[in-house]
Image: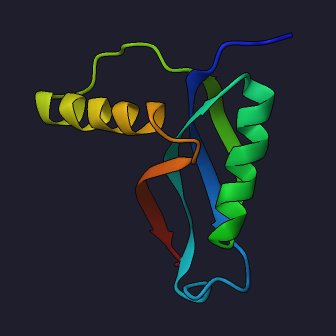
Amino acid sequence: MNEELRIYWTSVEFILKDTHKDFNKLKGGFVYAFLKCRDSEEALTRFKVELDKYDLVPFDFEFIKPYEVIEWENEKDTKHYREILKKASKSAKVILDGFYMYEKE
């Protein structure tokens, strides 16, 4: 079965492994991830592998779905994500975008 490649994306929340260089300062965060692949199962696996490279442990994938045209908050964000999609469509790599980190209290 030859499935078509599509851009999948997610918003994932994570914590830091105790081996992460900022483990003592940061609790975790979330990031958007984009990937050209066959289905959501492949996307999930590859998103986890990519996060592991950064010593991050995902604990909540808000969604994993094919990217569809959506309304972003403003024109600047719209342009930014169009560029991300263009980059993802030409690559086999996971693209992580917009790390938001939570400090430890």
Judge left or right: residue 69 versus residue 24: left
Q: How many marks?
A: 0
Q: Position of residue 3 (x, y in %)?
A: 74, 12
Examine the image and state in which quarter residue 104 appears.
bottom right
* Residue in the picture at 72% in, 76% down: 17
* Residue in the picture at 68% in, 47% down: 47
* Residue in the picture at 64% in, 58% down: 14
Asked if 93 appears above or below 38 in the picture, the reply is below
Indicate the colouring scheme.
rainbow
Q: Is residue 91 visible?
A: yes
User: Looking at this view, is 39 or 9 the one in front?
Assistant: 39
User: Looking at this view, is 23 or 52 the one in front?
Assistant: 52
Q: Is residue 56 visible?
A: no
Asked if 86 appears above or below 14 in the picture, the reply is above
Q: Position of residue 7 (x, y in %)?
A: 54, 25
* Residue in the picture at 22% in, 28% down: 78
